[in-house]
Image (cartoon, helix red, strand yellow):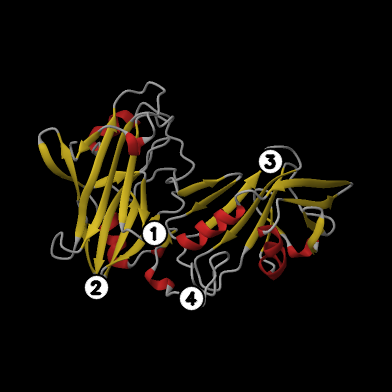
Amino acid sequence: MLERALSSAALGLVLITATGTKADTFRQFRDWAVTCSEGLTCSASVSDGGEGIYGLSLTRGKAADAPLGLILNTSSGGPASGPVTFAVDGKPAGELSADAFTVSNSGALETEAAMVAETILPVMRNGSEMTVSFPQGAETLTQTFSLSGLAASLLFLDETQRRDGTVTALAAKGSEPARDVSLLPDDIETPDDLPPPVRDAWEQSGSDCASFGSFTPEPLGFSATVESSRLFGLVCGSPGAYNFYYEMFLDSGGMVTPVPLPDMAPEGPIAVTGAWNVSWDDRTKTLTAFFKGRGLGDCGSYDRWQWSEGAGPVGGFVLLQSRSKPDCDGDYAGGPEAWPADWPKS
């Protein structure tokens, strides 16, 4: 992994206009794709790439009683002027009034009507395609979406949100009660969401973490439970076009300390203060980082750590693997997880 002092020079060569702070958890299942934030807000989406109604998404937060949302993206934007109808494999699957939807800032139609989960979704799960239709002004918009991959997407969403086997699951429903979400990760949207001691440590970091210039990170980062403490991964300073620097902090009963990350340098083991483009897997308590040598992602460095209770007085990270590919040659070489290992040496 490249340390920030080394990487800042490289970032100066790229346009510093950023639109996001990290790559969320992403999985593709045939025609559907699932993305989940570090705080386990998830979306399962399908798109036809055309005009009219070009995208459909099912969204859900991590709370036990979080409703299932439905989003329809249209090329024209704006509200429906009549009922929105759904048909699966040519058979009616439900109808929602135009008033059941709100219009987002981007012009998408959004609803959290109970019918989505109770009536429409069960029919979708057993079908091969769904047709959505509604009037918009003088025009009627109609689009048919593939349902291939939906069932696997819902299962992955349940597993990611720790719903599998519980009464709140969408696909992997069981008899277990809803799990305690207070132990699950949270998205940190703004500095105001931070506990005061954590915010103080972040703002006072030697890396000028709170100095964003004209950039506003959305979200700011995440928090997760590790043993009896809370781990915070927070965006630190102004990003580049495709690289976002994070520093880690541990809140142990109000005592906040920076969390170093062990790494391997040519001269031997070192500890670094942060990582780039991080992703947290709460099930395995692992943190990954992927520094992109350029936007294509065909070069750079990749690191993976796991939280260990025995690493330090209150726990810490252990380096599992470090990989790099210095040549930006258009060859992805199987992706960063398959690049040559710097640690451990084979």
Q: Which residue is mark 1?
A: 191
Residue at the extreme top of the image, as rendered: 329
Horizontal and vertical percent position of residue 154: 56, 58
Q: Which image quarter: residue 250?
A: bottom left
Q: Earlier in the sequence, mark 3 or mark 4?
A: 3
Label 3 with label 4: CB-CB less than 8 Å: no
Q: Earlier in the sequence, mark 4 or mark 2?
A: 4
Dot 1, crowdedness within 10 Å: few (<14), some or many (≥20)?
A: some
Pick the front one: 240 or 73: 73
Label 1 with label 4: CB-CB less than 8 Å: no
Amino acid tagged 2: Gly
* Rendered residue at 40%/24% (across/down): 331
Amino acid tagged 3: Asp
Secondary element under disc 4, as helix, strand or loop, is: loop
Dot 2, crowdedness within 10 Å: few (<14), some or many (≥20)?
A: few
Identify the mark at residue 48; answer none if there is no mark: 3
Secondary element under disc 2, as helix, strand or loop, is: loop
* C-alpha span from label 3 to label 2: 49 Å
Q: Which residue is mark 2?
A: 253
* Rendered residue at 42%/36% (across/down): 242
Q: Quadrant of the C terminus?
A: top left
Question: Which of the two discs, 3 and 2, sits closer to the camera?
Answer: 3
